[in-house]
Image (cartoon, rainbow, N blue to C red):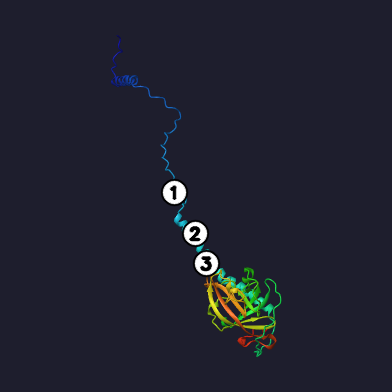
């Protein structure tokens, strides 16, 4: 074997030794893998999605709350309806009543008449449905004046008038002149019917006469009791001998389960051209 000559230069010998060691190390160590020109960064692990509870955001049906809201709405509706019936309808009817009375009445002497007659009063001719053919004056009701119309339909009563029962007597005739009126709502014209007492006058004004009736009795009956408007309301089976006036309205005041009845008997009449009856003295209802 041939060996290279030993160098006498210590520096050269150290350099060759290092070269020899580096070459041996390169032969033993594996070559590093080739690195690609571009490499994507490692993917960041995704944060797991938090499940969204959409049902939680939706309003849930609560039957107790729903029932409470319905009751509240019904209460508001009932209150509004009551206020309408008790106040608004009265105002509307009062305007219609005033117009009807003004159209019916004519001037009469502003003196107290002494001409009181017990003979049959003047007859009233034929009238048509809804026609104002008389007025009612009630001193016990602060001299309230109520128009009287033919018929007892709601269309008549809701104008604030007293309605004449068809097929009953006319004012002043033998038999039972019967009328109905609202106690509450639409004028409330019979509202104070319960304060009437025997002997109180009820005056019916026609075109030519004042007819004075006096309260005979009051009673409360079933709505089905039609004897109260028969020709002889006090003895339904007997023929009439007197001239009656019967007033009917609802009872109790804020209900209609019964009927409040006032029976009146004719006392006398006064010709309108002679003045006004003493029962209306100082309260001339037809003065203009």
CA gap, disc 3 to disc 2? 14 Å
Of residues 191 and 222, the one drawn nearer to the viewer in this rendering: 222
Q: In the shown orientation, is residue 259 left or right of residue 26?
A: right
Q: Residue at x 51, y 62 (%)?
A: 74
Residue 18 lies in quadrant: top left
3 or 2: tag closer to the N-terminus: 2
Of residues 77 and 127, the one drawn nearer to the viewer in this rendering: 127
Residue 156 lies in quadrant: bottom right
| Residue at mark 1 | 56
Measured as percent of width and height from the top left, residue 8 is found at 28, 17
Measured as percent of width and height from the top left, residue 223 is found at 55, 69
1 or 3: tag closer to the N-terminus: 1
Element at badge 1? helix
Element at badge 3? helix
Measured as percent of width and height from the top left, residue 216 is found at 56, 81
Pair 1/3: label in front = 3
| Residue at mark 2 | 70
Per the rendering, the mark at residue 79 is 3
Furthest residue toward right: 125
Of residues 228 and 149, the one drawn nearer to the viewer in this rendering: 228
């Amino acid at each position: 074997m041939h060996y290279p000559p030993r160098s006498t230069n210590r520096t050269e010998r150290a350099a060759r030794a290092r070269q020899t060691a580096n070459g041996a190390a390169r032969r033993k160590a594996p070559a590093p893998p080739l690195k690609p020109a571009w490499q994507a960064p490692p993917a960041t692990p995704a944060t797991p999605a938090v499940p969204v509870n959409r049902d939680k955001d939706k309003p849930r049906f609560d039957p107790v709350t729903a029932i409470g809201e319905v009751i509240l709405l019904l209460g508001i509706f009932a209150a509004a309806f009551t206020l309408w019936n008790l106040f608004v309808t009265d105002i509307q009817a009062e305007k219609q009543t005033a117009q009807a009375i003004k159209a019916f009445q004519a001037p009469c002497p502003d003196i107290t008449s002494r001409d009181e007659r017990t003979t049959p009063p003047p007859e009233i001719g034929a009238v048509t449905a809804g026609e104002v053919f008389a007025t009612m004056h009630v001193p016990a009701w602060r001299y309230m004046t109520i128009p009287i119309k033919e018929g007892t339909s709601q269309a008549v009563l809701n104008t604030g008038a007293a309605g004449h029962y068809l097929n009953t007597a006319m004012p002043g005739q033998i038999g039972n002149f019967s009328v109905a009126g609202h106690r509450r709502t639409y004028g409330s014209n019979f509202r104070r019917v319960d304060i009437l007492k025997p002997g109180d006058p009820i005056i019916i004004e026609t075109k030519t006469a004042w007819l004075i009736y006096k309260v005979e009795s009051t009673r409360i009956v079933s709505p089905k009791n039609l004897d109260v408007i028969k020709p002889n309301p006090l003895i339904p089976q007997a023929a009439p001998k007197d001239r009656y006036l019967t007033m009917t309205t609802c009872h109790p005041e804020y209900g209609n389960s019964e009927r409040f009845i006032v029976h009146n008997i004719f006392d006398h009449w006064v010709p309108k051209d002679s003045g006004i009856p003493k029962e209306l003295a100082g309260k001339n209802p037809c003065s203009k």
